[in-house]
Image: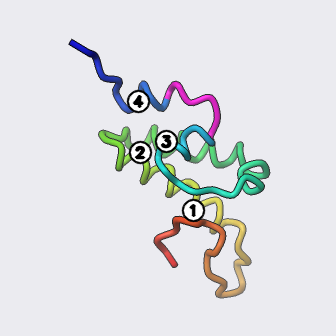
Amino acid sequence: MASTKTLSETIAEFTCIEDALRYFEIEFDSKFIDEYRQPLTKTFAGYLLLQKPEDWFEGRRALKNAYCKIQRGRLDKHSRSACRGCTSCQRR
C-alpha cells in the first residue's frame, strides 16, 4: 500500500518559494521574487500557521494571498492604481 504525503509534508520539502509557486501553479515574475523573497516567504508561512490548509486549493489560496498582499503593498497609497503585477490576481 503506497503512502501519500500530506500537504504539510509536501510544503515542508520546498527549498525555495519558487518551488511553492510552481507546485501551486502560480505564475510569477522572477525579478519580483528576487526582490521580495523574504517578505513573501514570511507572509506565506504566516498564513499557513494561521490556518493550516487541508487541501491543495487552500494551500494555493494562502500563497496567492501572500503574493497579492506584497504586490498591493508596493502600490502608491495615495492613488487609485490597480494591482497589475500579479499575473493570477483575482482583484483585477
Give the residue drawn at x 50%, y 57%. 65
Q: On residue 68, which mark appears?
A: 1
Q: Residue 21 carries which label?
A: none
Q: Distance between the residues labelled 2 and 3?
A: 10 Å
- Res. 8 mark: 4
Per the image, the residue denoted by label 3 is 23
Q: Is residue 55 left or right of residue 41?
A: left
Question: Mark 4 and 2 residues: CB-CB less than 8 Å, in contact?
Answer: no
Circle 2 — which element?
A: helix
Judge the density around disc 1: few (<14), some (14-19), many (≥20) Cα neighbours within 10 Å. many
Q: How crowded is mark 2: few (under 14 residues within 10 Å), some or many (20 or more)?
A: many
Residue neighbourhood size for the residue with mark 3, other residues' Cα within 10 Å, grouped as few (<14), some (14–19), many (≥20): some
Whether residues under marks 3 and 1 lie with C-beta atoms below 8 angstroms apart, the answer is no
Pair 3/1: label in front: 3
In three-dimensional space, the C-alpha distance between marks 2 and 1, rounded to whole angstroms, equals: 14 Å
Considering the image in quadrants, where does the N terminus appear?
Answer: top left
- SS type, badge 4: helix
Q: Distance between the residues labelled 4 and 3?
A: 13 Å
The alpha-carbon separation of the residues under discs 3 and 1 comes to 17 Å
Q: Which of 21 and 64 is in front in this view?
A: 21
Where's residue 59, x and y in %?
41, 45
Earlier-in-chain disc, 3 versus 1: 3
Residue 13 on the magenta segment: yes
The relative height of residue 77 versus residue 73 in the rendered view (above or below) is below
